[in-house]
Image (cartoon, rainbow, N blue to C red):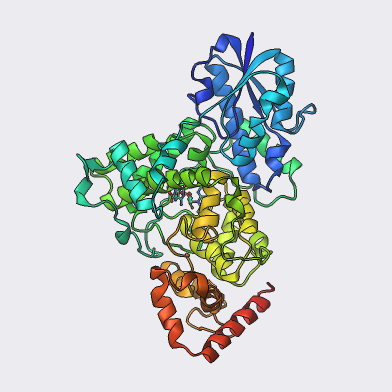
């Protein structure tokens, strides 16, 4: 009597639900690198190397802990190329009479796994993924009957539930949210902490060679790989962030600087999303740092909000809204994804920096994703599904449950305002205020129209004009539409014509 337990590539947590009650003596764990998972989008090569190396290290750790692990590498000649195929082969190989797994983190694989019991001829028990603070059922109950879903109220409930930064039933220092303090632009003379790096070991070097050989034409550099691939290394990198960068995380959360991809960010989403770090422990460490007087409250609160607020909230939306969420297109945007999202070959210094950094590091921070690449796509009317596939491919932390609500909902307003109360559309003035990109750009951020004017400026008003019917009644958009209404039809037509010229000049 052998039980086969499948561990997926983002389930690298020792007490994952599938392992919890298992008997190591009667169990074989299956882990498999399969082409179906490398190919459903064109993942960045550093992301592939990170996931495979972390999987191989996790398999070794499970073996050290006494489990029997059957590991199928991507270049194993017998590899069938799909998870279902590998599960079927392993059931035959080990004469397993039962399959156990933890549910997958996206609809595509969940739907596929739902058919396995019938297809494989053995009972398949698929348990919940309980590595989150809020279960799908809890989120659905929270959302039920609310007129509008807003992250802030969800976040307050998560604070109450976890007790993080609470004094009794009140928020620490009497205030829930310090976002208003977190908008400082960074300046060049700040001491910039560098993330702690983990040099590749022999396993990682093998994986890097395999990914280089197998995916020579894929997007993304494999050079300078320093991601942690074990729990201990991820914890060390996170501790280093708490000691050196967290104190200024809040102040400079929205800032962008040429040549500074990391600023005061933690670079741990990739570890959280794959199971190498635990979200609650991370937040407890941040709270401790505040209580010990090491970091200010605006930094600790801002950081914890991202994890117990945004991260849990977007996951709740993803599962609540169903598999069709990724196809929503409330603003009916249809333009193909610009080629420069893959090449960084554009004169727009901000977009060039964000894409080049994405190519080199499989990383861009939140404001680069939201207010540079996301904002440009929104203003230009890029098809949100094409953009979703891009974000899902290019970041080391990208998994559909977290990427899709951020892209479709927050960034593109393609869910019609379910997730965000207004579109994150901005002219070049915002980027100029929060970064030093504009001083090195061939476009003039102060100019409003014509071939030398910043494209964000030229596309901003045409975007609002195009979506008047949908957005003009939104109270948060009212000031912009008041300005627009003060302009005559002739001026509005000229703005639209200039926006169209801008798109043509950009080759779109
Ligand atoms: P920090 O800035 O240090 O923040 C700390 C942690 O907070 C992050 O590690 C992350 O776990 C969490 N967090 C912060 N903002 C969000 C958010 N909006 N949603 C969920 N979690 C958040 N995040 C992903 O983990 N995977 C994605 O695929 C992803 N795609 C995105 C796509 C778009 C268009 C946008 C606008 C945002 C996306 N985000 C995604 C959210 C956010 O940009 C990243 O979590 C963050 O940049 C990761 O870098 P970091 O670890 O240095 O985060
Ligand atoms: Fe970006 Fe416009 Fe500034 Fe150039 S001028 S960096 S395009 S915001």
The picture quadrant where one finds residue 110 is top right
Question: In the shown orientation, is residue 300 left or right of residue 306?
Answer: left
The picture quadrant where one finds residue 308 is top left
**Image coords of residue 358 (percent x, y):** 58, 55
Viewer-nearest residue: 116 or 57: 116
Asked if 406 appears above or below 466 in the picture, the reply is: above
Q: Quadrant of the N terminus?
A: top right
Asked if 132 appears above or below 244 in the picture, the reply is: above
Picture residue at 46% right of the left edge, 31% below the top: 130
Visible residue check, residue 451: no
**Image coords of residue 266 (percent x, y):** 43, 47
**Image coords of residue 451 (percent x, y):** 61, 83
**Image coords of residue 17 (percent x, y):** 50, 25
Visible residue check, residue 7: yes
Question: In the shown orientation, is residue 372 left or right of residue 334?
Answer: left
Picture residue at 59% right of the left edge, 46% below the top: 224
Picture residue at 63% right of the left edge, 56% below the top: 385
Picture residue at 64% right of the left edge, 82% below the top: 501
Asked if 85 appears above or below 422 in the picture, the reply is: above
Question: In the shown orientation, is residue 336 left or right of residue 499?
Answer: right
Asked if 191 appears above or below 167 in the picture, the reply is: below
The picture quadrant where one finds residue 27 is top right
Viewer-nearest residue: 293 or 476: 476
Viewer-nearest residue: 389 or 228: 389
Q: Quadrant of the C terminus?
A: bottom right
């Amino acid at each position: 009597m052998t039980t086969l337990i499948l561990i997926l590539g983002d389930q690298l947590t020792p007490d994952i639900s599938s392992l919890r009650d298992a008997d190591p003596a009667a169990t074989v764990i299956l882990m498999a690198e399969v082409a179906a998972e490398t190919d459903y989008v064109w993942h960045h090569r550093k992301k592939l190397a990170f996931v495979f190396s972390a999987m191989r290290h996790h398999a070794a750790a499970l073996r050290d802990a006494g489990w029997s692990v059957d590991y199928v590498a991507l270049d194993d000649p017998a590899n069938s190329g799909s998870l279902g195929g590998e599960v079927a082969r392993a059931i035959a190989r080990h004469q397993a009479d039962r399959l156990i797994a933890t549910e997958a983190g996206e609809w595509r694989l969940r739907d596929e796994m739902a058919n396995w019991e019938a297809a494989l001829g053995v009972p398949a028990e698929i348990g919940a993924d309980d590595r989150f603070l809020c279960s799908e059922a809890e989120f659905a109950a929270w959302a039920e009957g609310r007129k509008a879903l807003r992250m802030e109220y969800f976040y307050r409930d998560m604070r109450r539930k976890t007790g993080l930064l609470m004094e009794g039933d009140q928020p620490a220092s009497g205030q829930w949210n310090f976002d208003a303090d977190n908008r400082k632009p960074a300046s060049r003379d700040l001491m910039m902490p560098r993330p702690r790096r983990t040099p590749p070991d022999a396993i990682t070097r093998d994986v890097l060679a395999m990914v280089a050989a197998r995916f020579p034409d894929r997007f993304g550099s494999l050079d300078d790989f320093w991601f942690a691939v074990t729990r201990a290394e991820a914890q060390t990198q996170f501790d280093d962030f708490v000691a050196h960068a967290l104190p200024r995380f809040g102040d400079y959360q929205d800032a962008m600087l040429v040549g500074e991809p990391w600023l005061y960010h933690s670079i741990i989403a990739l570890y959280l999303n794959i199971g190498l770090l635990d979200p609650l422990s991370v937040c407890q460490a941040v709270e401790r740092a505040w209580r010990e007087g090491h970091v200010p409250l605006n930094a600790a609160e801002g950081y914890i909000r991202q994890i117990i607020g945004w991260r849990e909230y977007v996951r709740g939306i993803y599962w609540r809204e169903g598999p069709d969420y990724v196809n929503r297109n409330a603003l009916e945007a249809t333009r193909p994804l610009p080629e420069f999202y893959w090449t960084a070959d554009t004169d727009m210094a901000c977009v060039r920096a964000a894409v080049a950094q994405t190519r080199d590091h499989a990383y861009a921070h939140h404001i680069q994703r939201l207010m540079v690449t996301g904002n440009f796509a929104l203003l230009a009317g890029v098809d949100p599904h094409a953009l979703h596939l891009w974000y899902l491919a290019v970041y080391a932390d990208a998994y559909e449950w977290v990427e899709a609500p951020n892209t479709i909902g927050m960034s593109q307003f393609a869910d019609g305002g379910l997730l965000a109360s207004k579109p994150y559309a901005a002219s070049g003035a915002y980027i100029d205020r929060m970064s030093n990109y504009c001083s090195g750009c061939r476009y003039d951020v102060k100019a409003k129209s014509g071939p030398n004017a910043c494209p964000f400026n030229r596309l901003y008003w045409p975007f609002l004009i195009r979506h008047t019917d949908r957005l003009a009644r939104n109270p948060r958009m009212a000031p912009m539409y008041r300005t627009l209404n003060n302009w005559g039809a002739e001026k509005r037509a000229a703005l639209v014509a200039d926006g169209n010229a801008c798109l043509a000049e950009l080759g779109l």
